[in-house]
Amino acid sequence: MEHDKGHIIPYRTLLFVVTGLIMLTLISVAVTKIHLGTLTVFTALLIAAIKSAFVLMIFMHLKFETRFFKIMVLAVIAVIGVVIFITLLDYLYR
């Protein structure tokens, strides 16, 4: 029986990613203190998307998966985006 070896990510890379996630969290907290109007939500969502990309690629090892899995993750994200968009349209026109 053949066993697949897991991908070994160096501790240095993991430390950089964790540091980046912490820095992005601090930035998102700092952005809430600044009055940006309607851009506040967009900025928070952009920072959250970057953080989730880090987690998906490094900690969930999507970086090392096949193209099929990457396409499926993008498809799920697109479906979630469409559902949120439809929900917002429903909210706006009630």
Image (cartoon, grey):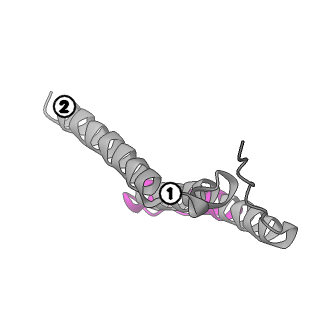
Label 2 is placed on what type of residue?
Asp
Q: Residue furthest left?
A: 93
Q: Position of residue 44 (x, y in %)?
A: 51, 56
Disc 2 element: helix
- Is any atom of residue 1 visible in this view? yes
Q: In this image, 83 relative to 28: left or right? A: left
Kindly identify the residue that appears in the image at 79 percent across and 62 percent down: 8
Q: Identify the residue position indicated by label 2 in the image.
A: 90
Q: Nearer the viewer, residue 69 or 81?
A: 69
Where is the C terminus found, in terms of image quarters?
A: top left
For the residues labelled 2 and 1, the Cα–Cα distance comes to 24 Å
Q: In this image, 2 relative to 28: left or right? A: right
What's the magenta bit mostly, secondary-structure-wise? helix
Q: Position of residue 18 (x, y in %)?
A: 77, 61
Q: Quadrant of residue 20?
A: bottom right
Q: Position of residue 50 (x, y in %)?
A: 54, 62
Residue 59 falls within the magenta-colored stretch: no
Where is the N terminus found, in terms of image quarters?
A: top right
Q: Quadrant of residue 92?
A: top left
Q: Position of residue 15 (x, y in %)?
A: 83, 67
Label 1 is placed on what type of residue?
Ala
The label on residue 93 is none
Residue range corresponding to the magenta coloring = 26-41
Disc 1 element: helix
Kindly identify the residue that appears in the image at 71 percent across and 47 percent down: 2
- 61 in relation to 2, above or below: below
Kindly identify the residue that appears in the image at 57 percent across and 54 percent down: 52
Q: Identify the residue position indicated by label 1 in the image.
A: 49
